[in-house]
RNA sequence: GCUCCCUUCGUCUAGUGGUAAGGACUCCGGCCUCUCACGCCGGCAACAGGGGUUCGAAUCCCCUAGGGAGCGCCA
């Protein structure tokens, strides 16, 4: 058998996750689950200044909320740790040194400012702003002068001057890059910490990862990472680049995540199942339009079904999955989702019936206490237009309804028949005023079950209110 | 500027030389129903443009246009 498949998600803890990150994490998770492999979480916190402890906690919490439990990583451990790059400094130093010894990397004494000027000049001259080794080389005495002044060098990888590099992208197929286009790049900052290119590639290899699914923005950087691994004689994972995700406005979903952030989704009451089902179909075709569990999504996940073109985040489509998720949720699940207090008004023996009745009209947690209030709370507030409509309906209508209840039973059929017999109205003119008077809303759950659930006193009071108005007929 | 990636209904997508170009969301219509929502059924709607190759191109090649990424001591 081939080696077990290992994937990872490697966020840097600089803030909350957004839809793009979530999809990347999800795809890696699904790929691992599909193949019975492992899903690793690695925290890329080499840039101490930008990393926040709080973000690490939050990222972990958000992933768990979605159900993307990692098999190895922070909090759970594993055989390839540490899983936070801040704990791997020694490893990076060791491998940087190996590259230096092998002549694959060298010290660069140029300063930030000098490099910036250089790039500017190159661009102004109409040439690519790639690093020029000849230009960067400083005379011996200048190097010692800078050393004595307390300056430290950065470590640069020595890229072969010509030739081509090929690799097989597991989503996009064969890729070819000309080495001449790639300048010598920094693998170690002058403060001794590793750069992203280096630590990221090294850890992917050292952690035994077989597949790395990441954003398309890394595609043109992949040759650099392959070069590093080659020089180190380490195995490289199979890289696959996911299409970009753009916002409703067409702009990339990056820092300005807008409403596509995890914080927003969760505050808005989006269900994890909804988000997962939506994200799974962004850049990956599904055979099914049904709501699926993570296990089911994993079962149909295939690398050759991953798309290549950018996808747009559409809140309306997310809303569709939210509806399916709510409809599929069990009573316990819904109760937990709505939170404590959502049922305060609902008699405990009617809670399940209540949920079954209102579920088709629920999309947000707040909808549950809302309907609880309509059914078991004080009377609804009526808008001026509703008041007008109910007054126009007339007192006779509601008197007839009440008489029906007294003579028969407090259910919709009895009420409707009584009103129909008394006033001769039917259809929309019969049901709409009833719904309005009883619920204070133009739409909602089926009126019959809703009335069955409602205490008779409440029902009568709602109807009675409109018998006092002067009959306009 | 250079290199690379991308382009099928409004949106997410199926399609890999021969299809009436299929599905989902939105929207519209019908049914459940003597109301609205839910649900079910149906309808509108697309191969970026131009050249080739071929008996035959959404599918292969070239060019153009548009979108995006990378070229950082950010990740």
Image (cartoon, coloured by chain):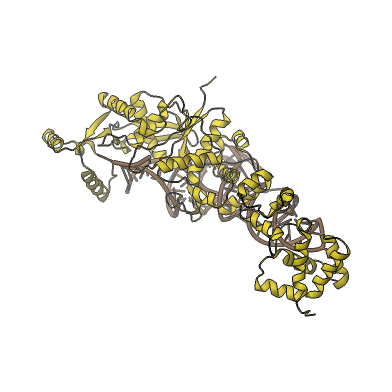
Chain colours: A yellow, B brown
The answer to which of A315 and A41 lies nearer the viewer is A41
Number of dots carrying numbers:
0
Is A222 positioned to the left or the right of A126 in the image? Answer: right
Q: Where is residue A458 shown, x and y percent of the image?
A: 75, 62
Q: Where is residue A30 shown, x and y percent of the image?
A: 55, 35
Identify the residue at horizontal 25%, vertical 24% (top origin).
Answer: A101
The N terminus of chain A - image quarter? top right
On the question of residue A24 being in view, the answer is: no
On the question of residue A399 being in view, the answer is: yes
Is A342 positioned to the left or the right of A395 in the image? Answer: left
The answer to which of A17 and A52 lies nearer the viewer is A52
Identify the residue at horizontal 11%, vertical 34% (top origin).
Answer: A141
The answer to which of A451 and A164 lies nearer the viewer is A451
Above/below status of A462 relative to A176: below
Q: Where is residue A432 shown, x and y percent of the image?
A: 75, 66
The C terminus of chain A - image quarter? bottom right
The answer to which of A434 and A25 lies nearer the viewer is A434
Q: Where is residue A96 shown, x and y percent of the image?
A: 29, 28
User: Quadrant of the rendered structure where residue A95 is?
Assistant: top left
User: Quadrant of the rendered structure where residue A205 is?
Assistant: top left
Is A392 positioned to the left or the right of A226 in the image? Answer: right
Is A304 positioned to the left or the right of A335 in the image? Answer: left
Above/below status of A442 relative to B59: below
């Amino acid at each position: 058998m081939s080696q077990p498949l290992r994937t990872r998600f490697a966020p840097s803890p600089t803030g909350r996750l957004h839809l793009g990150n979530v999809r990347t994490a999800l795809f890696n998770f699904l790929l691992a689950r599909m193949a019975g492999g492992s899903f690793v979480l690695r925290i890329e916190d080499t840039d101490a200044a930008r990393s926040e402890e709080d973000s690490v906690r939050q990222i972990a919490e958000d992933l768990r909320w979605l159900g993307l439990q990692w098999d190895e990583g922070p909090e759970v451990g594993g055989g390839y740790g540490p899983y936070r790059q801040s704990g791997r400094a020694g490893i990076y130093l060791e491998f940087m040194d190996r590259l230096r010894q092998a002549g694959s990397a060298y010290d660069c004494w140029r300063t930030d400012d000098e490099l910036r000027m250089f790039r500017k000049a190159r661009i102004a001259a109409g040439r690519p702003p790639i690093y020029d080794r000849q230009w960067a080389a400083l005379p011996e005495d200048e190097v010692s002068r800078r050393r004595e002044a307390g300056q430290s060098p950065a470590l640069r990888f020595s890229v072969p001057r010509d030739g081509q590099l090929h690799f097989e992208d597991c989503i996009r197929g064969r890729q070819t890059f000309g080495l001449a286009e790639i300048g010598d790049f920094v693998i170690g900052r002058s403060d001794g910490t590793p750069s992203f290119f280096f630590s990221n590639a090294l850890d992917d290899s050292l952690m035994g990862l077989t597949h790395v699914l990441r954003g398309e923005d890394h595609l043109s950087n992949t040759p650099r990472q392959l070069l590093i691994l080659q020089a180190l004689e380490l195995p490289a994972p199979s890289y696959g680049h996911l299409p970009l995700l753009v916002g409703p406005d067409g702009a990339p979903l990056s820092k300005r995540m807008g409403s596509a952030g995890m914080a927003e989704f969760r505050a808005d009451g989006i269900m994890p199942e909804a988000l997962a089902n939506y994200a799974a179909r962004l850049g990956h075709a599904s055979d099914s339009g049904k709501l699926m569990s993570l296990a089911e999504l994993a079962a149909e996940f295939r690398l050759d079904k991953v798309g290549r073109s950018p996808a747009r985040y559409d809140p309306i489509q997310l809303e569709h999955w939210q509806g399916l998720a709510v409809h599929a949720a069990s009573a316990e699940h819904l109760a937990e989702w709505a939170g404590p207090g959502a049922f305060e008004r609902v008699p405990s023996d009617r809670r399940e019936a209540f949920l079954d009745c209102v579920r088709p009209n629920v999309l947000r947690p707040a909808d549950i206490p809302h309907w609880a209030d309509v059914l078991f709370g004080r009377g609804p507030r009526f808008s001026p237009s509703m008041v007008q409509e109910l007054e126009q309906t007339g007192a006779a209508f509601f008197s007839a309804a009440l008489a029906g209840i007294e003579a028969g039973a407090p259910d919709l059929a009895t009420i409707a028949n009584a009103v129909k017999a008394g006033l001769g109205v039917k259809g929309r003119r019969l049901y709409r005023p009833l719904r309005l008077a009883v619920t204070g809303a133009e739409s909602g759950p089926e009126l019959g079950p809703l009335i069955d659930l409602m205490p008779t006193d409440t029902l009568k009071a709602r109807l009675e209110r409109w018998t006092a108005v002067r009959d306009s007929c």
